[in-house]
Image (tube, grey):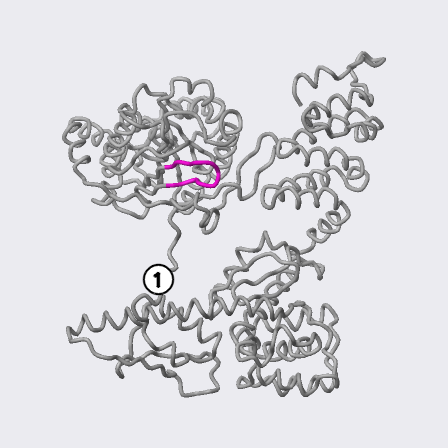
Amino acid sequence: MSNGLQNERREQPNMRGEVVKQPLDKNELESILDRILEVEFTFRQTAEPAQRLAAMDRATQDYVLDWVGRVTSNHIELGYQYACYADKALHLLDREMVEAWALHAMDVYDRDGLRPALAVMHGLDDFLEDQHQRVSGSVLEEVNGVLSGFLHGLSGRRLKLEEGPHPYTDTEVLYLPPVMARLAGKHDNFLLYKSAIALLWAQTRYGTFRVLLDGALDPETASDELVALFHALETLRLEAHIARELPGLFRQMERLKAELEQPALSAPWRELRRRVQSPCTTAHDCLCLAEAHLGRIQPFPDRFYRAALKPVAVADCMAARLEREKARFKVSLKELEDEQREKQDREAKASRFEARLKRDDPEREAMEMEILLDGRPMKLPQFTNKLLNSILLDLGNLPEDYLEPAGPGDYDAKLLKDEEPDPEDVWSGTYHEEGAHLTDEWDFRRQHYRKGWCAVRERTLIPKDESFVRETLRKHSGVVKQLRKTFEALRDEDRLLRRQPDGEGIDFDALVEAISDAARGHEMTDRLFTRLHRSERNIAVAFLVDMSGSTKGWINEAEREALVLLCEALESLGDRYAIYGFSSFTRKRCELFPIKRFDERYSAEVKGRIAAVEPQDYTRMGFAIRRMDAILREVDARTRVLVTLSDGKPDDYDNYRGEFGIEDTRRALIEARRNGIHPYCITIDEQARDYLPHLYGPAAYTVVSEVRALPFKVSDIYRRLTT
């Protein structure tokens, strides 16, 4: 709350002389709300929420007004709705839950926009139910990584996980509800997620949707009763496949059915289950059974994972994929044909591609097919092999027309590769957050994180000529020798161990204490010696280099020279080290530039990358520190150090400048320290003493007049941080 608002609050002493804040009246509250919500420009009516706030004690009033300010910092309408619903929320929920409700609304606003966030504000009852479920339930957001790993370990097409109202798949994405809470324990609810994933995966893996491709089941005209009966029969067929493919999970699924008291199948359904359990049974067989029994038998109650079948969504997705993959496969065959001709250096002639099954046993569930060119088996590139497997999942075979290589202009060959999008396309709307590392960012106004707020990508620096490195080493040859000598001394430095039972010297402090003990009649210790001990260094240090536009000119040149000198010196020390550059242009474009990774040696390519370090955009520091924190934590080292080299304070094109950027950077540094990382900053910003103590603490930064002084500071930094 601002000082202006605080000044409006009345304070009165009680009978004991203690200052007690008196509740604010309706007019005072309305005035404060008008100011927070900027009603002069928005014309919102604050009389009603002010009236409800006036009935509260002063501490509760202060609490609500503080949170109105936090929520308003995201959007004024969201803050206004919080003010309107705060009274109801405090009656229904405890304060911890009220805060969770407000934070959830702000998170939804960050992710999905204003309308869904307002729905959270208005849906207090739904939020309360959801929170009760989350206490014992499994939350998709929290277990998504583990479930994605499980899904990616299964055979077949690579599928993605996304949130949806209930479990279903369109053959490329598996949709799961945000919370699974049908059982009492989190682990069992997690297993419900895995069970649903297994069934949806099996639908794509074992050909459930092939009945749509040949028109056996028309998604537009098929009756709901037929689709439901077909889905029930398919569920039994796929459960048999899961029992063979994933027996451990299937046993857990059977246990969960018992936990949920799933009714046993009736006698007719047990007979149908027996008929569809064979590995040779197909989706077409199940559809024929469904048509034969339509009107004669009702589908059994839905299985515990409650997966749905959506033929229309599947048909649309499959149609687009089939066209795309057919064209890609034909172009890929054309490339294979051209490559084969070039290898054999023969005149162009008609070639013939064929496909044949690798296996002879029809009982095997995995179809394997090989491609032959003029009768000879071809080793397919990984991309082409993935295409072939995906086509087989959809069609069950490879049609003849797929085996005709593409002709000139048949297809854009650039679409053959599933390449990472070019980061330069971010403003063209081609990918934004797709494929990026999403990192949180601390919002000091809401006193909470914006979840997945920054889209972080690693960008490759194209190495330049090493002449810059050679010239730097020639220009600073004396400095290089001096630094190597200093770092070699650090490497060979011995540590004096005191109070040892034997050693090369006498520990006089221990001796004096021992003589004093003997004089008092106590036993005299024998740990009276000192010994030099050389310990193995187990250190990893990461250098984070500011590549913002403000480093243009002599600063950039000096940064590159300093990196060359550092690398030359660190090579003599033997510690593991990495160098990354960073830059940003709003939260959507946060970029790291690997110059030298921990597992890379100091090679000609690394030298070329140092030469290629050039100024980019802005200095959003929080995301870079968090990513380097994650990278450092993957390195097995006793001591981890993060040294940031920057020419100024945190800044970006959006609202990151000023207090926002400083507080986010400070929070990122606190996170790093909690993770056992020692952060340090070297800057040439003469005004840095105004803010660096707040960020790093009084002893964790150095201000230098020019970046050229950096290498001379490093040995002292190392001595303090790594010994």
Residue 322 vertical position relative to residue 283 in the rendered view, above or below? above
Q: Nearer the viewer, residue 108 or 210?
A: 210
Q: Nearer the viewer, residue 66 or 478?
A: 66
- What residue is rendered at 49% in x and 66% in y? 320
Q: Position of residue 8 (x, y in %)?
A: 74, 16
Q: Nearer the viewer, residue 266 or 638?
A: 266
Residue 679 falls in image quadrant:
top left
Residue 392 visible somewhere in the drawing: yes
The stretch drawn in magenta includes residue 586:
yes
Q: Which residue is mark 1?
A: 412
- Label 1 sits on a secondary structure element that is loop
Residue 371 falls in image quadrant:
bottom left
Left or right placement of residue 412 versus residue 484 in this view? right
Q: Position of residue 70 (x, y in %)?
A: 65, 31
Q: Which residues are magenta?
A: 582-592
Q: Nearer the viewer, residue 643 or 620?
A: 620
Q: Quadrant of the C terminus?
A: top left
